[in-house]
Every structure is written in C-alpha cells, then in structure tokens.
Amino acid sequence: MSIPIIAAEAPAGEGESAALKDVQHYMRPGLLQLSSLPPLSLYVHLPWCLKKCPYCDFNSHEARSGAEGLPEARYLDALMADLEAALPLIWGRTVHSIFIGGGTPSLFSPQSIDRLLGDLRARLRLEADCEITLEANPGTFEKDRFRGYRAAGVTRLSIGVQSFDDRFLQALGRVHDRAQALAAVEEARDAFDTFNLDIMYALPGQGMADLEQDLRTALSLSPPHISIYHLTIEPNTYFAKYPPVVPEDDTAYAMLDRITEMTGAAGLQRYEVSAYARSGHASAHNTNYWQFGDYLGIGAGAHSKLSFAHRIVRQVRLRDPRRYMDGALTGRAIAQDADVRRADLPFEYMLNALRLREGFTLQQFMERTGLPLTAIARGLAEAERKGLLTQDAGHVRPTERGFDFLSDLQELFLAD
C-alpha cells in the first residue's frame, strides 16, 4: 500500500492523544481554494501478526497466545467509536473503496470481518460497486476461510506471498512455506474474481535465475494483479540493525527490467511503479491514493488525508493497539492532526501521481491541491528538460527514464 508522506506538527506523545476538533475548525477560511472534493476511501488497520518480519516497518504487533489472544470484539468496538467520532468530517460523502490492512487482517475470523463490514455499512454511504480489499497471509488460514471472507462481503484479496522459494521465505522471516503459499493462492482463486499477489525481489542471496523461477511460479497461477516490491532496509527494523547481503543496485535494476518483460508477456500491464494488472483488475483503492484522493484511516496508527474547501488535513491515530482502544472508546484516538503546508503540496502530490504510468492532468492537479499551475511550472519545465516527463494537451506523464529515476523526478517539486 502506498502511504503518502506526513506533513504535520509535532505529534502528541504516544501516551497522549490530540484533542478532538469541531468540524467548523476544518471549515474555517484558509490559503487553499478547492473547487470540489476528491473521491473518498476508507482504510481500516488491524495491527496484529503472528510474528514481526525483520524487514517490516509497518505498525504491526505480535499477537499474544493463550487466553489474552486477539481482542477482536473490543478492537471492533474501538474502530466503530473511532469512525463515529470522524463522521462529521466526511458527512454526506460516498466511500468508493475500503482496504483492510495490517498487520495480518486474516488473523481475524470471517465472523469478525462480517461484523466489521456490517458495522461500516450501517454508518457509511458506500458506492454500489465499492471495492473491499482484505490483506491475507499464507499460514494464517484454514480451508474455506477465504470463502468466509468472500461471504462477509470482501471483494478482493491481497495475499502476502513475498516468495515461493523456501530459502527466501526463511531469509525474510515469513511464517509460511512454499506449499502454504501455493495453497493460499489456489483457495483465493477459487473464492474471488480478483486478487493480488505481493512479491518481493532483490532478496538476500537472490540471483536472476532465482527471481525468474519465483516469477514463473507466480505467473503460472494466473493472478489478475501482482504488486512487486524491491526489498528495502527500513530504519528501526531488525534488518536495519543486522543488514543482510542483498543484490547490488545494477543487479536489482536488471531484475526489475526482467520483471516488466515477464509480466508483460503474461498479459499484465505495469500501470504503476510496483503494480502490474490485467485489464479491469487495477486496484481502485491504491489508485485513489496515487491520484491524491482522500482517505479516512481508522485503527491503531492509521493515517488519514482529508480535503476541505480551504485546507488539506492529515491525521494519525495512536499507534499502540491497547492505547488506541482505550483512546478510541473515550473519543481520543487521534495522535496527530495538522494542515498540510501549502508549500509542501506540490511534492506530496507528485510523490503519488508520478508513480502512475498515465500520470495526471493539470486540471486534476489544481482540483486536488487547490493550487494554481504556477506552483509546479518550474518543476515541470526542469523535469521536461531532463527528459523525465512529457506534457501533451494538459496531460503530464513520466517517461521511461522518469520511471527509472522516480525519486529524482519527484524531488524537483520539493519546497525551497
């Protein structure tokens, strides 16, 4: 999942929460002029995993065993309290997609997911064809569990396979093996019309032949969508403290070229830097992120980006699950709440929109940021001069070079 950067004031301490603000606070006059509001999505964070992976910097926590287990019912109560407190900020707006992420949401029972979705439908206006995605990991389901999620109303499954090779699964600290990964994909294929496979490359000890074999296995399962990510060593992870030996940059670039060749030959088009899909199977939820749409995030550590007539606001919920539950149930779930600085909006927009093969229109930039085109004119001219993007009839697209050097392209829009 693509998470845009946070441009916010200093956060409250993890034991604290930010005071709730009246909706009039967000509607007051400001520096932006948004003529309309973008599409709205909902993100729901379920933060528990069986085991913390050594590369993971997401807000995830190992589930306790025994009687304490997963506090599913209390957490669902907290989510609804959190949502109800936020409803005035999105009143009257339609939700176009829902993404249930983690953590490992498939640790929650189909009955809990059924309750969650029923509670959401009772409080929100959902688009008739609302895409509802659930993240699931192999090794956390028994037979027919995925069918239970489908019966609950989930329309799309995203499976965290990462690799089909036991050597690399072990190196990544995954709790499943190749056989479980294959079984999970088979079950997803039987239960869902569309699903996604998460795959990683440039893994410790991985060579080109290893990558090709992994990808051949993935493509043989005919997935409608694959998200393929370069393993990165994130701060505050086990891998940051004990870095593994990973392929050199030149090898990783060659791997990416091979990924694009193999997925293209299999009928999947690269519509975003890390996303490949068959026609009609692109992720609506992630596309809304990349198009700088709005999203309300509920759950421990969840992020929100919400637009109003004169400002764009980012919020972050309390990270620790138990503090979050205590806070949400007493109306104090928010840890950070601040306007995005006007000067930061061009970079924030480009950080997302330039990940898309189709880019964006100048009209959309103005609508989504409330800024005039003069705010990005210099960056566009410099990027075009460097061959990183093209402009045609008000449409801006990254070139192949821009895709390959995306960070360099995005940095041209940083505030001075």
Image: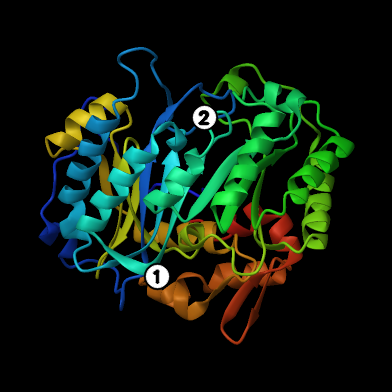
The residue type indicated by label 1 comes to: Arg
Choose mark 1 or mark 2, whichever is in front.
Answer: 2
Residue extending farthest bottom: 393
Residue 208 sits in which quadrant?
Answer: top right
> Circle 2 sits on which residue?
140
User: What residue is shown at x 18% (from left), y 28% (from top)?
Assistant: 326
Quick check: can you spot residue 251?
A: no
- Residue 361 position, x and y percent, is 53, 77
- Residue 142 shows in this picture: yes
Q: Secondary structure at mark 2?
A: loop
For numbered disc 1, what is the local secondary structure?
A: helix
- Closer to us: 202 or 114: 114
In the image, is 67 to the left or to the right of 139? left
Give residue 320's position: percent from left, percent from top.
Answer: 31, 27
Q: Determine which quarter of the picture holds residue 354.
A: bottom right
Can you say whether 166 is above or below 127 in the image? above
Residue at the top extreme, as displayed: 66
Rate crowding at label 1 as few (under 14), some (14 to 19) or many (20 or more) other CA atoms within 10 Å. Answer: many
The residue under label 1 is: 368
Q: Nearer the viewer, residue 197 or 205?
A: 197
Which residue is depicted at the point 48% across and 46% down? 147
Q: Residues within 10 Å of mark 2 (few under 14, many from 20)?
A: some
Image coordinates of residue 49 in percent, x first then y, are 46, 27
Q: Quadrant of residue 378?
A: bottom right
**Left or right of 60 in this view: 199:** right
Q: Nearer the viewer, residue 64 or 30?
A: 64
The residue lying furthest to the front in this view is 144
